[in-house]
Image (tube, helix red, strand yellow):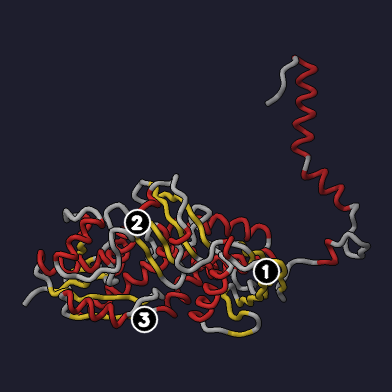
Amino acid sequence: MNKKVVLAYSGGLDTSVILKYLEEKYRYDVIAVCVDVGQRDDFMAVKKKALETGAVKVYIEDVKEEFVTEYLYKGIKSGAIYEDDYLLGTSYARPLITKKLVEIAEKEGAEAIAHGATGKGNDQVRFEAGIKALNPNLKIIAPWREWDLNSREVLVDYAVEHNIPIPVSKKDIYSRDENLWHISHEGGDLEDPWNAYDENVLKWSNTPEKAPDSPEELIIELYKGVPKSINGKEMNPVDLIKYLNEIGGKHGVGTIDIVENRLVGMKSRGVYETPAGTILFEAHKAIEKLTLDKDTMSFKRIAAQKYAELIYNGLWFTPLKEALDDFVDSTQKTVTGKVKLKLYKGKCYAIASASEYSLYSEEYVTFGEDEVYNQKDAEGFINLFTLPLKIRAIMNEKKNKDDGVEVI
């Protein structure tokens, strides 16, 4: 009886070839696991293809709601954005996929987990860090780090030779990752950063030029940092994300073209479409500005940067990430309210906000007459606030008179 391996399977080019490779080289019984995090696939066709390619068993795991509530919502609350641009679409999906792979490997008595991440990318680290954190006894197989099928063109030839149907050709060679949060595009002509991306690479979104000529407004309501309703209608988490992807994509919101620093030390270039994420981050930011005090906001920005780095680097199942989640949750107790947003030609603007926990006081900031603030109090505050500057200037004057040397 052959030993078992669990394969993270998508039905795409790489994992289809890997399935056959594991069977031929290692003589494994391959259990294909396709985790549904919102990619727009025909999962019955994926299952059929895996079985026809040689899998002894196929799991299709629908985890979309868990993906939103336990992963994406944590990201929204944290404010995590990698290198000021990337909303971490792939990074959030990998730890959840890994968790399911480990659960199924334990259930099936498999000795190993295999994945299709390349030896140049971040995903190899994300998968393997999660596996080691959840079950260090499982063997890990990463074919891209050991075989001689060293390009997607060669993979296409291998697939044709082994009668494996594939969704790409040598003319459409982009590497894409899709889930409920985003779709990414890498490879092909995008590998030269001097090549402006062709608008035909986009799958979800209009370009700003093709977006509607009239803006559209919507109201998003949040409760403790989590979106609950759109335009007064409560929606379940998955439907809410889908709706915002549709309306955001229509207006060209959330498309970025960036060069990023991979964990393994090289730079990569990718085009990302994240319409819902862009809208929700803008809404969340508006409510935080209304309800959080200055020092908490300032420190939370520092924490958000670290949170983004942890998630990008595959360190989801770590003590620091858990501690940061506790900190973030403590800041979200008052992040409740509603935001009016305008979508127009690739941009999302927060144009109005309200909250019962608002720290904004019109009575204090008004330019008109008020009875709560004595403007004369500002004089004493300024005298104390600027005292170090005043003392330095006095010392410079004294030193200049004594020997003509300025105090630095």
Which corner quadrant of the image does residue 127 belong to?
bottom left
Q: Which mark is residue 214?
A: 1
Tag 1 and tag 2, C-beta contact below 8 Å: no
**Residue 73, position in %: x, y?**
51, 72
Q: Which mark is residue 122?
A: 2
**Residue 210, position in %: x, y?**
57, 64
Amino acid bearing label 2: Asn
Mark yes or no: residue 138 visible: no
Locate the N terminus and report the quarter of the image it occupies: bottom left
**Residue 202, position in %: x, y?**
46, 63
Residue in the foreground of this view, choosing between 188 and 233: 188
Mark 2: secondary structure: loop
Taking the image as shown, residue 221 lies to the left or right of residue 170, namely right
For the point 21% across and 63% down, the residue is 140
Q: What separation in Å lies between label 1 and label 2 (alpha carbons)?
A: 40 Å
Tag 3 and tag 2, C-beta contact below 8 Å: no
Residue in the foreground of this view, choosing between 268 and 52: 52
Identify residue for label 3: 62
Amino acid bearing label 1: Ser
The answer to whether residue 157 is above or below residue 239 is: above
Amino acid bearing label 3: Asp
For the point 21% across and 53% down, the residue is 150
- Mark 3 and mark 2 lie on one chain; the one further toward the N terminus is 3
The answer to whether residue 391 is above or below residue 336 is: above
For the point 80% across and 67% down, the residue is 361
The crowding category of the residue bearing disc 3, from other C-alpha atoms within 10 Å (few below 14, some 14 to 19, many at least 20), is: few
The mark tally for this picture is 3
Taking the image as shown, residue 10 lies to the left or right of residue 391, namely left
Mark yes or no: residue 253 visible: yes
